[in-house]
């Protein structure tokens, strides 16, 4: 397995098509445990964390999303991360390839606190009433007819856009705080720019790609 480490965490690359954590399906954590006898990293994680703490896992990714999973090296790092996340004091970064030319967003972006251009998406989200595998963005009272439960306020920020004119797609850098199920996928699709390979929200276009083009690439603390 591909991994990287720094002072605080181990970082593993999760491929598309596998769950992040323990559940009904075989998960990335189950895969890690299979390596326990041969991996000193897994042994180190297991020395501090059990299955209840998900071996120190700090983030989860949708099954179809690829990219970095972060594992705390110590209980102190684990609890500090959870505290920062609860208070929205950290960002998680993703890169996605989407259908269409999103360059207009750069011109209509708001200026962030650090002077950067940011396009912010704030549609509340909720589980779909009829399609259990889908989520719904609430843009009008009409959307509430498809909602199951109460909408949650979430925010997705689009930081950079690079247009691939020959493909008719754009590469976008986005960030979120805590994250909600399918948040980035739904927000981008609701804007009219679904992620390439998204069989749920890109309709028939997803057949051009065999995997969802959404990748977890890192995080940043704000303190």
Image: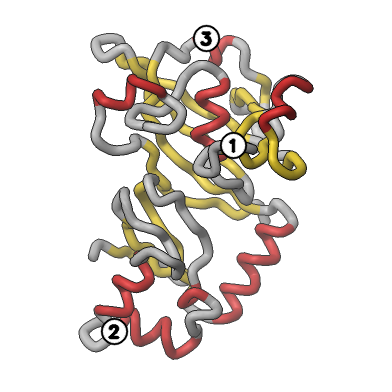
Instruction: Tell me the residue that label 2 is attached to.
Output: 36
Judged left or right of residue 96, residue 165 is left
Residue 113 visible in the snapshot: no
Location of residue 179 in the rendering, given as x and y in whole percent from the top left corner: 60, 47
Q: Residue at x 36, y 15 (%)?
A: 163
Q: Nearer the viewer, mark 3 or mark 1?
A: 1
Q: Looking at the image, is 134 positioned above or below residue 31?
A: above
Q: Nearer the viewer, mark 3 or mark 2?
A: 2
Mark 1 residue crowding within 10 angstroms, few (<14) / some (14–19) / many (20+): few
Q: Quadrant of residue 191?
A: top right
Instruction: Tell me the residue that label 3 is attached to.
Output: 104
Q: Residue at x 30, y 10 (%)?
A: 165
Q: SS for tag 3?
A: helix
Q: Quadrant of residue 208?
A: top left
Could you tell me how far apart the alpha carbons at marks 3 and 1 are, in whole angstroms?
A: 34 Å
Q: On residue 130, which mark appears? A: 1
State the scheme by which the image is colored.
secondary structure
Q: SS for tag 2?
A: loop
Looking at marks 2 and 1 on the same chain, the residue that comes earlier in the sequence is marked by 2
Looking at marks 3 and 1 on the same chain, the residue that comes earlier in the sequence is marked by 3
Q: Residue furthest front?
A: 130
Q: Residue at x 78, y 22 (%)?
A: 141
Cβ atoms at labels 3 and 1 below 8 Å apart = no
Q: SS for tag 1?
A: loop
Location of residue 3 in the rendering, given as x and y in whole percent from the top left corner: 29, 64
Could you tell me how far apart the alpha carbons at marks 2 and 1 are, in whole angstroms?
A: 41 Å
Q: Looking at the image, is 131 positioned above or below residue 142?
A: below
Location of residue 80 in the rendering, given as x and y in whole percent from the top left corner: 64, 70
Location of residue 88 in the rendering, given as x and y in whole percent from the top left corner: 70, 51
Between 43 and 210, the one lying in front of the other is 210
């Amino acid at each position: 397995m591909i991994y990287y480490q720094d002072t605080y965490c181990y970082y593993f690359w999760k491929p598309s098509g596998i769950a992040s954590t323990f559940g009904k399906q075989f998960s990335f954590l189950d895969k890690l445990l299979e390596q326990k006898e041969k991996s000193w990293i897994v042994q180190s994680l297991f020395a501090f964390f059990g299955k209840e703490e998900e071996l120190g896992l700090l983030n989860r990714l949708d099954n179809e999303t690829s990219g970095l999973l972060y594992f705390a090296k110590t209980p102190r790092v684990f609890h500090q991360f959870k505290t920062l996340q609860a208070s929205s004091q950290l960002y998680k970064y993703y890169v996605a390839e989407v259908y269409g030319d999103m360059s207009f967003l750069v011109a209509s972006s708001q200026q962030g606190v650090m002077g950067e251009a940011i396009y912010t998406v704030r549609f509340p989200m909720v589980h779909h009433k009829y399609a259990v595998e889908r989520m719904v963005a609430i843009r009008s009272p009409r959307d509430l007819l498809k909602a199951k439960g109460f909408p949650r306020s979430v925010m997705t920020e689009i930081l950079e856009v690079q247009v691939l004119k020959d493909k008719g797609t754009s590469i976008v850098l986005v960030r979120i705080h805590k994250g909600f199920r399918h948040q980035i996928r739904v927000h981008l699709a609701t804007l009219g720019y679904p992620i390439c390979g998204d069989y749920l929200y890109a309709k028939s276009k997803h057949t051009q790609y065999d995997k969802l083009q959404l990748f977890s690439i890192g995080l940043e603390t704000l303190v």
